[in-house]
Each structure stands twice: as structure tokens, then as C-alpha cells.
Image (cartoon, grey):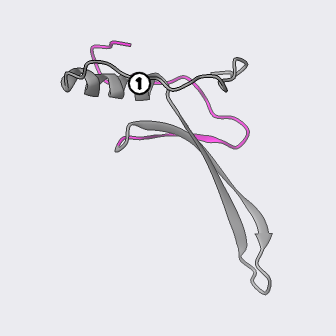
């Protein structure tokens, strides 16, 4: 995970109308998509549904490891990976 210059760049490309973004304020990677769901009665403007999934990738982990090292924390905790999919493409 160590790199001498800049953050790691994730090679994962979003698919199926999902877009990958990195929020530098929270050091979080997420996928999002939106889609029109229906029209409001009496209005020509459609309602939109927004979906997002946040997750860790090499870029977000690098930022968090830097925080841990710079703050001299004693360790980290990782949540349960039980629902993790082993057939993902990234």
C-alpha cells in the first residue's frame, strides 16, 4: 500500500450506469447512479431516485493508513466481511 508519490489510483471502472467518485473531504470511495422513477401527478417534472454504495479501495485505504500513521494510533478495526462478494470484477 505504500507509495512514494500521491494516492493510489484505482483501476476499477464503474459499470451498468454506476459512476465511481472519490470524496477527498471524507477519503471515501463510492459508486452512484440516478434514474427517473415516475412523474408527479399534475407535473411534467419526473421524480429521481438516487443510489450510492460506499466502499474501501486502494485509494481510500491509503488515506486512512496515512491518518493512522500520522496520528500514532495503535491499530485499526475491520468490520465483518461476511456479505462480501467474491465474484466482483474489481
Which region is colored magenta? 1-24
**Residue 33 spot, x, y in % from top left:** 65, 49
In this rendering, the answer to whether 68 lies above or below 45 is above
Looking at the figure, which quarter contains the N terminus?
A: top left
User: Is residue 64 within the magenta segment?
Assistant: no
> Element at badge 1?
helix
33 on left or right of 11: right
Q: Exactly how many numbered labels are in the figure?
A: 1
Label 1, on which residue?
61
Q: What is the crowding at mark 1: few (fewer than 14 residues within 10 Å), some, or many (at least 20)?
A: some
Determine if the magenta segment contains residue 3.
yes
- From the viewer's side, name the closer residue of 84 and 62: 84
Task: Please give left or right for residue 84 compared with residue 78 in the image.
Answer: right
Residue at 73% in and 39% down: 16
Q: Which residue corresponds to the image point at 77% horizontal and 63% vertical from the top-left? A: 37
Dominant secondary structure of the magenta stretch? Answer: loop
| Residue closer to the observer: 53 or 35 | 53
* Image side of residue 47 versus residue 67, left or right: right
| Residue 20 coordinates in the image, percent (x, y) | 56, 38
Q: Can you give x and y, in whole percent of width and height, for residue 77 in the image?
A: 41, 23
Please tell me which residue is depicted at 68% across the width and 64% down the height of the picture: 48
Amino acid at each position: 500500500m505504500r507509495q512514494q508519490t500521491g494516492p493510489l489510483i484505482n483501476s476499477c471502472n464503474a459499470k451498468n450506469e454506476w459512476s465511481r467518485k472519490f470524496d477527498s473531504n471524507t477519503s471515501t470511495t463510492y459508486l452512484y447512479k440516478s434514474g427517473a422513477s415516475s412523474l408527479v401527478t399534475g407535473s411534467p417534472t419526473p421524480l429521481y431516485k438516487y443510489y450510492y454504495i460506499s466502499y474501501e479501495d486502494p485509494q481510500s485505504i491509503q488515506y486512512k493508513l496515512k491518518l493512522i500513521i500520522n496520528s500514532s494510533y495503535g491499530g485499526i478495526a475491520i468490520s465483518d466481511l461476511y456479505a462480501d462478494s467474491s465474484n466482483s470484477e474489481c
